[in-house]
Image (cartoon, rainbow, N blue to C red):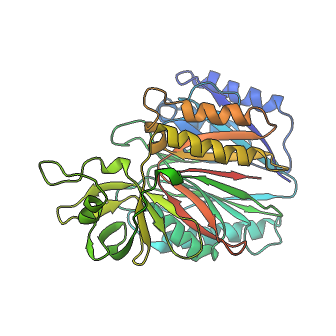
Amino acid sequence: MIQARTAFTNEIDDVAIAVEEITRQLETAGSYKKHTIGLLNAYAEYVESGVVSALASALPFDIIGTTTLGTWTKDSDILESLTLTVLTSDDVFFQKGLTEPISGEDESIILSAYENAVAEAQASGNVNQEKPALILSYAPLLMNTGGDFFIQAMDKASGGIANFGTVSVDHTPDYSQCRVFYNDKIYTDRYAFMLIFGDIVPKFFVASVSSESILAKTGLVTAASGNQIQTINDNTVSDFLVSLGLTKDENDMIIGTNTYPFIVDYNDGTAPIARVIFAITPEGYAVCGGNIPIGATMSVGTIDKPSVLSTTEAEIRALAATENASVAIIFSCVGRYFTMGYEPQKEAELIHDILGQTNISFNITYSGGEICPMKHNDSDAYANRFHNDSLIACIF
């Protein structure tokens, strides 16, 4: 059984006060069990001021996490916070892991880190399982490495163990302050993860583009390379989008592509996922926020404030109704944050209003990419997926 507690601070500048606020909140919650970890998310300025490193050094357990442009708990009141979710248990064991620096899509780096973490867990004498029940992932935002790489490499290493987590993000225009936390060390190019061993059955929730916001016309991906879709129904992506009614500007470029995510059906029995369109190349190809395979069925949706709030509310109400849930870890895409316009806290407030009426400890953090399993329709099996423009949640 896992018990959870959360703590937060809004104190960016005074390191001593920030650390005291967090430790006091944790002490009030009671003693720790045999095994304990902390999941830390923070506005990037807490890194620059030294709060993140000082806090990690002061706490008696391992820490992993990332920067974000917004994070909130049941008790905090602004998104520009530092939040800590503590998981503690007598019969569930937590093993941290960290890769070497990542400069490209070299799977061996992740395979090695996973193998080392499993070996360390086995050597501890605290586990009697060959594999963990769950992986929590905190990945760096890298310009030359896509989110699917982390999932595919970890799948290869673990044999497909359920993988849940986030890609770091921050509040700057060029995301130059994205960081990954590993105890008191802070990295720009390493992937931190936590292996959870024990008798746990996590449940996952995904809110994406509402069905009412998806256009009826579909197409088949007939040529693609990684995160670049080249043709749909043997026509360029640009032509496919025009056939749906999207328009081009004076430079022959599709207007507003970032508000029209692709909805991708892998045709493998899992629910479709969202893929944001970053750009249209001069050839008419689409550069997307994740890999899309040849043979996938494509449709196009729209994302706006009402649809974000409606899909979030539906999933969070379902989460709140789950029996025996004690903790919820929630990540929401920055794309959903930006659709809130002049009310950037609106989605987080909605989650707070619903879960605040329950006994569930929770944390909502904005993400640069979401990692969450998708269940097969005809079985209890899951397939790990990288998501865009989505809210994901994991509960114990």
| 352 or 83, nearer to the observer | 352
Please, is residue 100 above or below residue 47 in the view? Answer: below
Q: Position of residue 37 (x, y in %)?
A: 72, 48
Q: Position of residue 313 (x, y in %)?
A: 63, 41
Quarter of the image for residue 326 reads top right
Q: Position of residue 272 (x, y in %)?
A: 53, 64
Q: In the shown orientation, is residue 27 left or right of residue 107?
A: right
Residue 370 in sight from this viewpoint: yes
The N terminus, quarter of image: bottom right
Quarter of the image for residue 201 reads bottom right
| 55 or 134, nearer to the observer | 134
Residue 7 in sight from this viewpoint: no
The furthest residue to the left: 250
Please, is residue 134 above or below residue 381 in the view? Answer: above
Q: Position of residue 167 (x, y in %)?
A: 50, 52
Query: Which residue is rendered at x = 56% and y = 39% of the image?
Result: 309
Query: Which residue is rendered at x = 44% and y = 26% of the image?
Result: 342
Quarter of the image for residue 291 reads bottom left
